[in-house]
Image (cartoon, rainbow, N blue to C red):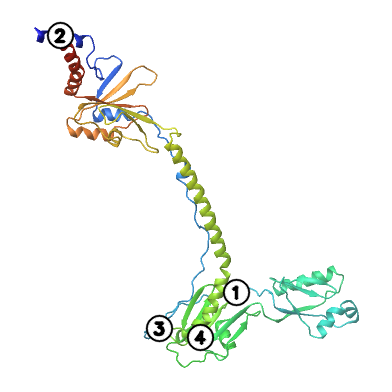
Amino acid sequence: MKKGLIAALVLFLSGCGVAYISPGVPANDPKVDVRPLTLQIVKEANLAPYRPKTLPAVFFQSAGGAAGLRGIGAVPPASLDRPTKPSSLPVKLPPSAPQVPYTIGVGDVVLLSSPQGGSTVEELSGLLAAQNSRQGYTVQDDGAIAIPDVGRVLLGGLTLEEAEAQVFQELVSNQMDPAFSLEIAEFNSKRVSVGGAVAKPTIVPITLVNLTLEEALAGAGGIATRDQDYASIRLYRDGTLYEVPLREYYKRPAVQKTRLAPGDSIFIDTAYELDNAQAYFQEQIALAQFKQQSRVQALNELNSTMNLRRAALDEQRTNFLARLEVDAVDRDYVYLAGEVREDSRFPLPFDRKASLADALFSQGGMTTEKANPSHVYVLRAVKSTDRVVAYNLNFRNAGNLVMATKFELRPDDIIFVAEQPVTKWNRTLQQIVPSLITSGAAIANN
């Protein structure tokens, strides 16, 4: 009799809705369109338009680079211990300097002379006094010479013909007799140094006539070495070292006629290890390094600017990450419910699309002992309607999990994992059994 009462009580509680009711996706709801996932359905679902949120521009910016800075150029090679003599010396022929007219420079001395005459002496007394005493005019740092009764005349950077025209114009402007002649008495602004195994190391000036390599060597008294097999002419120009073996120099007239440029340095080396040349070229290297100080300073300034820029970018990125941590950044989310490790929301990543597999497994996945693998749904609302599409993933066949990696999520999607039938039954019993025990005890007492 009591057993019949208990069974009747169970049926009564279930019928009244007191027993456990679990959520699910009804297959017969006219507002819910259940679509089993296939590769074709996945392709159709992925056509839904969506543009992922993007990271701020500071995450793609860099602090910049050192584009445009010039290097220090080539330098003469250093030499340590004396190696064995090579079978041949290296050859690197120097190019001829461009053939250009001589231009007056700082340090040059020019002479002005005028014809003898009373009127000229009266009008150009200062000029003739200087000419008669054979005094020249030295081109000063600003490229000008100072002519008495005329003033400063700028000649620096001018050819001799241009300089004559400039002086003529100044004399005419000062209402003086422009009859004169102009010549360069001393060439001091453009020079070539010659050292090493020569009779007399010297500085050879470049004059109105282009200076050649053989003329520069002749100006130093010629080459003074008997070891022509391992002697070389080394020419240092604008950071580059050129080498001409002495025997090669004698065999090539064209090399002997090589035009030199202002600032060239020539060294006759008689040892393969360059012991004698090292000290000489060290001075040239030191001069080149001195000229590079401005470049070094510019590089330091650039590095400072880059460091400041890098610090500013790091600060902006840190600020964004801090705002992201306190949920102060506009994000797109999908939501997980049902038999998952924990009901939660999954933020869609920046600058890319996420898959169903990303959301499921990054949040801990499903509870395998309770979840129903044949009833995994992605619920997606149809815009401007009250309808819902429920994409059903059935992975009792584990091969269907591949579709989870291809199915792209959209903002506000809901991932729902249904429970297994036995889980539903166990939960119903967990709710009913305590009531049965209480009810049974009450009936027994009565």
CA separation in Å, label 1 and label 3: 41 Å
- The 10 Å Cα crowd at callout 1, few under 14, some 14 to 19, many 20 or more, is few
Q: Earlier in the sequence, mark 1 or mark 3?
A: 3
**Figure quadrant of the C terminus:** top left
Residue wearing tag 4: 268
Does residue 256 appear in this view? no
Residue wearing tag 1: 99
In this picture, residue 414 sits left or right of residue 202: left
At label 2, the amino acid type is: Asn
CA separation in Å, label 3 and label 2: 115 Å
The label number, if any, that marks residue 81 in the structure image? 3
The label number, if any, that marks residue 445 in the structure image? 2
Disc 3, SS: loop
CA separation in Å, label 1 and label 4: 25 Å
Q: Earlier in the sequence, mark 2 or mark 4?
A: 4
Q: Front-most of 122 and 11? A: 11
At label 4, the amino acid type is: Ile
CA separation in Å, label 2 and label 4: 128 Å
**Which x, y percent locates residue 285?**
53, 75
Q: Earlier in the sequence, mark 2 or mark 1?
A: 1
**Which x, y percent locates residue 400?**
21, 32
CA separation in Å, label 2 and label 1: 129 Å
Q: Are marks 2 and 1 in contact (CB under 8 Å)?
A: no
Q: Front-most of 439 and 273? A: 439
Q: Earlier in the sequence, mark 1 or mark 4?
A: 1
At label 1, the amino acid type is: Gln
Does residue 38 appear in this view? yes
Q: Earlier in the sequence, mark 4 or mark 3?
A: 3
In this picture, residue 112 sits left or right of residue 101: right
